Amino acid sequence: MNPLFLEERKFPRVLLAVGGGFFLIMGIILTLTNPNSTKYEKFATEELVRYAKENICPAQSSNLEEMIKSQVCNLIVDTGKNKIPQLIASNTKRNNYLLLSLYTTNLYIYQFETIAVFNNFYVINAQKLHE
């Protein structure tokens, strides 16, 4: 029997064991770092407030009426901040795939799809549903 032949057969087994161990460890890490719905609601609230203040509330011109509308918009966003998590929770569907989650939030005019993985959230699609 050729001793080199035995060495050649051990290498794939070692590689398979190391690779399998790596995938097992990554699976455990992904499962442990899959954020829950409460964390998503906090993330989505912060993003929605930021989006509203940057894109909806700013005055379109420097006239007094636009400035007042801008201030009222900011006031509404700030006072309604406590209700936004409830709005998001009631309009969000979570698909939990154990290693990661996919959240779909439907907020009347917009629909957002977000991937949750490694304790982070990544918006992968933001679609305007109505004009």
Image: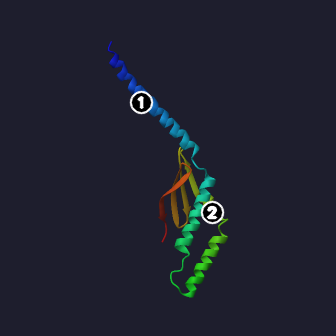
* Residue farthest toward the bottom in the current orientation of the protein: 64
Residue 98 appears in the figure: no
In percent of the image, x 54 and y 73: which residue is there? Answer: 56
Position of residue 82 measured from the top left corner of the image (x, y, whole percent): 67, 65
Point out the frontmost of discs 1 and 2: 1
Upstream in sequence: badge 1 or badge 2: 1
In percent of the image, x 37 and y 21: which residue is there? Answer: 7
Q: Amino acid at mark 1?
A: Leu
Most foreground residue, 104 or 122: 122
Q: Amino acid at mark 2?
A: Leu
Position of residue 26 measured from the top left corner of the image (x, y, whole percent): 51, 40
Q: Which mark is residue 15?
A: 1
Q: Examine the image and state in which quarter residue 75 appears.
A: bottom right
Q: How many marks?
A: 2
Asked if 31 appears above or below 1 in the picture, the reply is below
Residue 43 appears in the figure: yes
In percent of the image, x 54 and y 68: which residue is there? Answer: 51
